[in-house]
Each structure stands twice: as structure tokens, then as C-alpha cells.
Image (cartoon, rainbow, N blue to C red):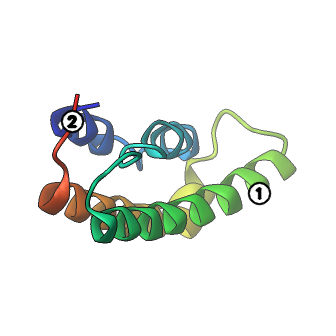
């Protein structure tokens, strides 16, 4: 995945619970194999924060029967934290990402 691909994913990552779950899943291993251990640690910490928000949102969405229309709870309880997590990941990527592939 390139930094540009990451940015495209990040654009709509907080649109809803499914988009955020997809973003978190697709970006988990972005820094695997990074030579810069500080960058890897920063990315993993930021990604873990995103995963916590993701897990909480998915658990509630699942407990409520996975409704197709779940915008209200998403916006009220999770979207802000998701946006902060995406911004933290974007900051690490912008500062450190140098794909080896």
C-alpha cells in the first residue's frame, strides 16, 4: 500500500461503522517490516487506538442487530474518536512512511 492509497482509504474511513472497520483492517500491517523502530512503535500505538474504537463500535452495532441504518449511534458515540484515530495514523504515515515495495 502506498501513502496515496492510505490517504484515499482515510478520506471516507469515518463515514460509518463498516467503513471504519474496513479502514482499520486494511491498515493494520502498513508498517510491518519498517526499519525505523520508532516509526513502527508510533504507528502501532495509533493503530491500537483505532482498533479499540473499532472494537467498541462493532460490538455495539452487532449487539443492536447490525442495522443497515446506524448513523445516529455512530455519529454520537464513535465518529469523533474514529476521526481522531485516523488523524493520528495519518500524521505517522505523513512523517514516517517510506514503502520498501
Establish if 40 lies above or below 58. below
Question: Which quarter of the rendered picture does the N terminus lie within?
Answer: top left
Residue designated by label 2: 100
Marks 1/2: CA–CA distance? 38 Å
Q: Which image quarter: residue 66?
A: top right
Residue matched to label 1: 60
| Image point (30%, 71%), residue name | 38
Q: State the residue at coordinates (50%, 46%).
A: 24
Residue 68's spot in the image, x, y percent? 67, 33
77 up-or-down from 32: above or below: below
Tell me if residue 30 comes above or below residue 54 in the rendering. Answer: above
x then y, percent, for residue 85: 40, 65
Q: Which mark is residue 38?
A: none
Report the residue at 20% width, 38% height from top: 99
Pick whichever, 41 or 94, lies toward us: 41
Expressed as whole percent of the image width and height from the top left, the position of residue 92 reads: 24, 63
x and y, in percent, of residue 84 in the image: 36, 69
Q: What is the secondary structure assignment of the residue under circle 1? A: helix
Name the residue at 31% across, 51% down: 34
Judge by depth and name the residue closer to the eye, 50 or 19. 50
Amino acid at each position: 500500500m502506498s501513502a496515496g492509497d492510505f490517504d484515499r482509504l482515510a478520506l471516507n474511513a469515518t463515514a460509518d461503522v463498516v467503513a471504519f472497520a474496513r479502514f482499520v483492517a486494511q491498515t493494520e500491517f502498513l508498517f510491518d517490516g519498517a526499519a525505523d523502530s520508532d516509526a513502527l512503535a508510533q504507528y502501532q500505538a495509533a493503530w491500537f487506538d483505532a482498533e479499540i474504537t473499532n472494537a467498541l463500535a462493532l460490538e455495539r452495532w452487532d449487539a443492536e442487530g447490525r442495522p443497515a441504518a446506524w448513523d445516529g449511534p455512530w455519529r454520537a458515540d464513535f465518529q469523533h474518536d474514529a476521526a481522531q484515530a485516523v488523524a493520528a495514523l495519518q500524521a505517522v504515515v505523513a512523517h514516517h512512511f517510506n514503502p520498501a515495495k
